[in-house]
Image: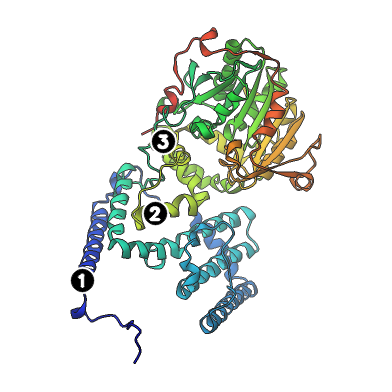
Amino acid sequence: MSDKPSKVPPKWDEMSEAGLEAMERYARHVMEAAAKTQALIAGADPSKAARPVDADPFNIGPEATEVWGKLAADPETLAEAQMKLWQGYMSLWTSTAKRIASGESAPAVTPEKGDKRWRSEDWEANPFLDLVKQSYLLTSQWLLDTVSSVDGVDDATKKKVAFFTRQMADAFSPTNFALTNPEVMRAAAESGGENFVKGMKNLAEDLARGKGRLAIKQTDLEKFEVGRDVAATAGSVIFQNRIFQLIQYLPTTAQTYERPLLIFPPWINKFYILDLRPENSMVRWLLDQGYPVYLVSWVNPRSDLADVTFDDYYREGILEAVEKTIEQSGCETVNTVGYCIGGTLLSAALAHMGQHGDARIQSATFFAAQADFSEAGDLLLFVDDEWLEEISRRMDEQGGVLDGATMSETFNMLRANDLVWSFMINNYLMGKDPKAFDLLFWNSDQTRLPKALHLYYLKQFYRKNALAKGKLKVAGDTVSLGDIKTPAYFQASREDHIAPYPSVFKSAKQFGGPTKFTLAGSGHIAGVINHPDAEKYQHWTNSAKKLPDTVDAWLAEAKEKPGSWWPHWDKWLSKKSGELVDAKTPADGPLKPIEPAPGSYVKDRGD
């Protein structure tokens, strides 16, 4: 008779008191979670939501029907697709059978590199979960490959259907469901189901904060305060108009370069992505290198600014900021930086200024900024007639501005697994509170967008690519990027999904003056905001005096270097910044401080 303990579970009447209490506790928590879910459903009133629910705001239904209709009308392609799926499943069954028999077998399909959904060891250690994972990966990849293989459909329609097919596939990932997510089930076992109760509480709070619209909490919003924890670099607002506040930062060195550095961040987000905590603040780093830093803090517009235009942002934004920086610094010229959409505006401004012989801007640096939108990536999917009509309708409902939540949802869709589903799992299934993270606090601090400006930007740049084609009108004149003779430094990021690096390179190629191109590791934010002390990622540089015809040719001759690209930029910028002079504080100039940095415009959260 064996001495090994029996693995047969005890009968109910033989269970320990502690075991029965655990079972009762689990059942109670599950019932409580179910009751909270029913209360949420019962209390939901679509008429009280922030806006009506549109079943298909992107008009994907007719286009998906067209794609799958073309496939159904092509028996040969359809049969080939079905055979490919069948072969994939046969390979998976064979692999699974070998694993059950011998304990070892190579997987039939593996996740893409960097896919964090499968980080739990259970997805490989448990044969059942491994089968679920591989079945999902096989089917979702087959769906995407099948959509891409359809003939007789224009590329724009095919890309749009492929994008939303991926969104659907991501939504149906087994990681998003409690019963097929091992981390969730382990949390349920350990907490007696309390994670589900806490998850429903988190869901209710997010719905309340979004006024009926799900506003997923990505970080602990109470841990940060603008001006205290982030955007805390010392300085003063020295000028303001209806569109922006101009911040002059307090120097951190006894001497600074003579020529000021004026930064134009995107108006879609708050400027303090450039000034997060001291250890990762680009503004503070620039001050420490001896640059006199000025920065534009765009207004968070309300209905009274619904009609402001791109020309208004040029005249009252770019030109007035340049004029006031020159007045305050006493230097006749400035160096500039444009980040993302701020760089697009700066490109158009430079084209107009170049056409009129205005040389007050001596150099321009572009962070992840596009002037040529022909390869602008997945955001091109959001500028068709149906979506522009939907955007216009939403802005009319909101008094002529687009709320920050809509833009946030759009950007989150581009990286749904990282920015949507991971938080759905953490907050609602695991019942955890999100961690405090400065970058995600900034990401949640979205701004409103004026109707006239935003629709103009989507139509003229994304839709028509008017600036790159020499058809954009700025202040009444048709401008060309070839008129820009200002020395320019372009930074792009290898994994940028908003401003893809081939698009940024094509923008640099169109400039008429000397241009430098640098490629950083990571994406749209982390690729830019990468303090040298962090010793993260890498960057690529190419010493050729002239950019080659294609980005692939540039990459072929580029050298990879570890760490941040900031020091490389510093070497370029310092040569264009003049002599060292005694540092000037905001109080030293003719424009006297209005209020301490970061100013009041950035503190308007748009609630």
How busy is the neighbourhood of tag 3: few (under 14 within 10 Å), some, or many (20 plus)? some
Residue 246: x and y in percent read 52, 19
Residue 351 or residue 154, whichever sits in front: 351
The residue located at (71%, 40%) in the rendering is 506
Does the residue at mark 3 contact the one at mark 2 (Cβ under 8 Å)?
no
Residue 426 is marked as 2
Among numbered discs 1 and 2, the one appearing first in the sequence: 1
Q: For the residue marked with disc 1, what is the amino acid? A: Leu
Residue 407: x and y in percent read 47, 41
Q: For the residue marked with disc 3, what is the amino acid? A: Asp
On the rendered structure, is 354 left or right of 600?
right
Residue 335 or residue 447, whichever sits in front: 335
Among numbered discs 3 and 2, the one appearing first in the sequence: 3
Would residue 190 be visible to someone looking at this image? Answer: yes
Q: CA distance from mark 1 to mark 2?
A: 28 Å
The residue located at (42%, 27%) in the rendering is 227
Residue 8: x and y in percent read 31, 83
Q: Which residue is mark 1?
A: 20
Residue sitting farthest toward the top: 590
Does the residue at mark 1 contact the one at mark 2 (Cβ under 8 Å)?
no
On the rendered structure, is 366 left or right of 243?
right
The residue located at (53%, 69%) in the rendering is 139
Residue 248 or residue 500, whichever sits in front: 248
Q: For the residue marked with disc 2, what is the amino acid? A: Asn
Quadrant containing the N terminus in the rendered view: bottom left
Q: Which tag is nearer the camera, tag 1 or tag 2?
A: 1
